[in-house]
Amino acid sequence: MDVKLLTHTPEPDRVVATAARLCYSPRAAEEVWEGFSPEKQAEFITKLSSYGHYSPFEHVSFTLAIAGVSRSLSHQLVRHRIASYSQRSQRYINEGTFQVVVPPTVAGDLAAQEEFDRIMGQIHEAYDRLIKLGIPQEDARYLLPNACQTQLIMTMNARSLLHFFALRCCRRAQWEIRELAWKVRSEVMKAAPLLFRESGPPCLVRGECPEGAMGCGEPYKKAEVEADHGVA
Amino acid sequence: MDVKLLTHTPEPDRVVATAARLCYSPRAAEEVWEGFSPEKQAEFITKLSSYGHYSPFEHVSFTLAIAGVSRSLSHQLVRHRIASYSQRSQRYINEGTFQVVVPPTVAGDLAAQEEFDRIMGQIHEAYDRLIKLGIPQEDARYLLPNACQTQLIMTMNARSLLHFFALRCCRRAQWEIRELAWKVRSEVMKAAPLLFRESGPPCLVRGECPEGAMGCGEPYKKAEVEADHGVA
Amino acid sequence: MDVKLLTHTPEPDRVVATAARLCYSPRAAEEVWEGFSPEKQAEFITKLSSYGHYSPFEHVSFTLAIAGVSRSLSHQLVRHRIASYSQRSQRYINEGTFQVVVPPTVAGDLAAQEEFDRIMGQIHEAYDRLIKLGIPQEDARYLLPNACQTQLIMTMNARSLLHFFALRCCRRAQWEIRELAWKVRSEVMKAAPLLFRESGPPCLVRGECPEGAMGCGEPYKKAEVEADHGVA
Amino acid sequence: MDVKLLTHTPEPDRVVATAARLCYSPRAAEEVWEGFSPEKQAEFITKLSSYGHYSPFEHVSFTLAIAGVSRSLSHQLVRHRIASYSQRSQRYINEGTFQVVVPPTVAGDLAAQEEFDRIMGQIHEAYDRLIKLGIPQEDARYLLPNACQTQLIMTMNARSLLHFFALRCCRRAQWEIRELAWKVRSEVMKAAPLLFRESGPPCLVRGECPEGAMGCGEPYKKAEVEADHGVA
């Protein structure tokens, strides 16, 4: 899996803090914008986070390139509707050399890995034969597996990202989209550490799980997150 | 493919016409609602359609059960963001007896159909073996094909449906989601013929194609639509 | 203020429970739909609420007529973006006989009420004079006050309503939209008591306030809600 | 009215073109991104516009400061739901020195202007008196007029902006929001001339009006637009 922040709204802290301050200030937006010291910005953003006032976070968006993920993942991902996606098309691209995502449970079991490799080889061959028989790519792809790697460009604003992290950094999310969520979080934290300081699963951020009886029973701990993802 | 309208906002014409009329009328909403004859409602809706004023169409929504469609289709479908979906989960359901969608180009070619059947049989066996090896369903599914049948409940409001029909009834949409779009259209037309009288691909509705050089060059004709889908 | 439920998706419990169950059941949607006893539906909905799994709640929507509210309120209301609105137009309707919403703080102070009445009378006259001078309605309305009554038809799905109640039933919301929120809640609870049983401000529903230092310090109590709104 | 582009996604052409190309290219997103010459980008964007394929346009967003507009305008503006807004609050800011927007029809008629000025003066005084009587700002504002100036920060992506221009640059939009739409267009065209080259009302862009019998009958002409807004 490869996740890279391609671009984002410049000066994200300034944008969010200015938008928030404008609501309460008689001064002109440009004046607020110009005279806003980084310290004051930080103070504002910390307050917004602590009050749960996230609407100003919508003004900054982040565009990421995501590659080496499965179509299982992308089908889950695009269910997040407050976001924009452009995805590699299996209709218009010949997938004769498709690569696959191997689940860790499969990779950790010799017999399973063998089985997995065999069937992937067979699917490769079948795809090629259908193409040779003149079946269009958009139809030959009906036999391609969920494991098939895809590639996307995704844009989400900071508020939508916070929601994405709350749901998908959670242990109850599938391992692959969970891995994606933590990687996206690491990427956007480089660009806007303050905005995402209080981001992640509710167990980490608020110290409690909203899923009640459905919860996993293993809340994340700051130390674990720091060890695994470099940033807490 | 099986498409069935489960339920919808009652009296869709009355709802849309009342909402539209309210904007221009000094009378109370309830009074407008009560005194609205079907003829007057029809007149209003016809006008709204001809002016392209579709925001009142948002007040009515349609809930459909969709079955026997592929995961290729569902991945395309859920990209329509102004809608709600609940979908059969491959994480929580054992797919040992999965059924498949066969593309017409495959079904129309003996060699291709044989190839398709063989690989589907092999995938079935591989899936079962992974399950037996203790691989969780959510990971075993990585080898399931796009052809795998899924089931959804989808809710869309009438305005979003009009957009869906404009894009997906088009010949440039893939055959499967195009078939779905026309079937959904037939279903909702039973409940709200007036709202969807001017629906479908732009070639049919407006007599022109917005895709310019990318267009298919074969505009739909009313007679063809009537023959194929019962309603024009 | 007058709030009336005009219509809604029929059998809301059945719709939500069927959509939720479909995700985990190998059975066909129609079969789930048909065989779903009210008791089982209730069990499902109670679980969904306790886990915070609200996406199936999106499949049912509620259409309300709202009258006798101010333009201050409607400007706040339409900021809720996952909803549909049709509103009485000040461009197309002559507002010569506009009525007003009087804030309780004004109504409770004789001098303030007098001042308020006087200025409203003056605005009335000024509006009429501008109209007589040939100024178009859409421009004469520039002097109309926020207090001016408006009328809307609003459609929201149950998930969006839960969010609306969480924000606007809160004591920190302005008194007018808070009154609206509680009235909308009473209306939709008549149609779908189960879906909205755990609805309202976080202090009432979860026993805690997410606004931290910005909180009002006076959490709602069930008894108070029941006394004021008939339903807890 | 003062409209200023505060910030936007950097390199908007590159972002849109890369997102579009990714769908059809077997190459990695980063590779597409790096190797994309401005000429090739322009070619792609021109094609996308001509086909009406606007989804890649969603990846770039624009943040604008808007001041000196009326609350009539802002109430219309925030109806555009695929956007983010932060607005000067009349609850939290003392509006004792509120300024107003004067409609051109009023400014162009001596008697109307006099009437307008008189009533604005009276409203000023009444607002001050209510405040002095201890009425909270959020309630005193009930007598503030639609003409009252407000200030917003608005973020919209390029696709949503195209829709905004199509509706609000139109002569049937009210003069004030039409003026805003053209000014926003001028601002974003400085940053992304290619993306917005084919933007504006349908009469200008496509040479036809979708409103049929409701149309204004006076289609915009390139020369007029260039004369009035500097860019066609």
Image: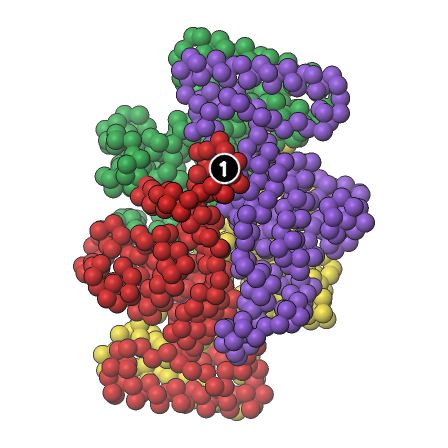
Chain colours: A green, B purple, C red, D yellow
| Quarter holding residue C119 | bottom left
Left or right of B41? Residue D146 is: left
**Nearest to the observer: residue C82 or residue A84:** C82
What subunit carries mark 1? B
Residue C85 x, y percent position in the rendering: 50, 63
Q: Is residue B44 visible?
A: no
Residue at image x 49%, y 37%?
B87
Q: Residue at x 46, y 91 (%)?
A: C125
Nearer to me, D25 or C193 = C193
Classed neighbour count for the residue bearing mark 1: other residues with Cα under 10 Å, few (<14), some (14–19), many (≥20): many
Q: Label 1 belongs to which residue?
A: B87
Question: Quarter-wise, where is residue D97 in the image?
Answer: bottom left
Query: From the viewer's perspective, is A32 left or right of D102?
Result: left
Reply above or below: D130 against D80: below
- The residue nearer to you, when weighing A101 against C218, is C218
Q: Position of residue A125 (x, y in %)?
A: 64, 13
Question: Residue C222 is drawn in which quadrant?
Answer: bottom left
B230 or A72, nearer to the observer:
B230
**In the image, is residue C159 above or below residue A89?**
below
Seen in the picture, residue D162 relative to A25 is either above or below; the reply is above
Q: Can you say which quadrant of the picture contains the C terminus of chain D?
A: bottom right
Task: For residue B68, say whether it is visible.
Answer: yes
**Which residue appears at 45% of the width and 11% of the height?**
A112
D140 in relation to B126, above or below: below
SS type, badge 1: strand
The image shows residue D33 at horizontal and vertical percentages of 56, 33
How many circles with numbers are drawn on the protein? 1
Three-letter code, disc 1: Gln
Expressed as whole percent of the image width and height from the top left, the position of residue C27 reads 50, 33
Q: Residue at x 33, y 64 (%)?
A: C182
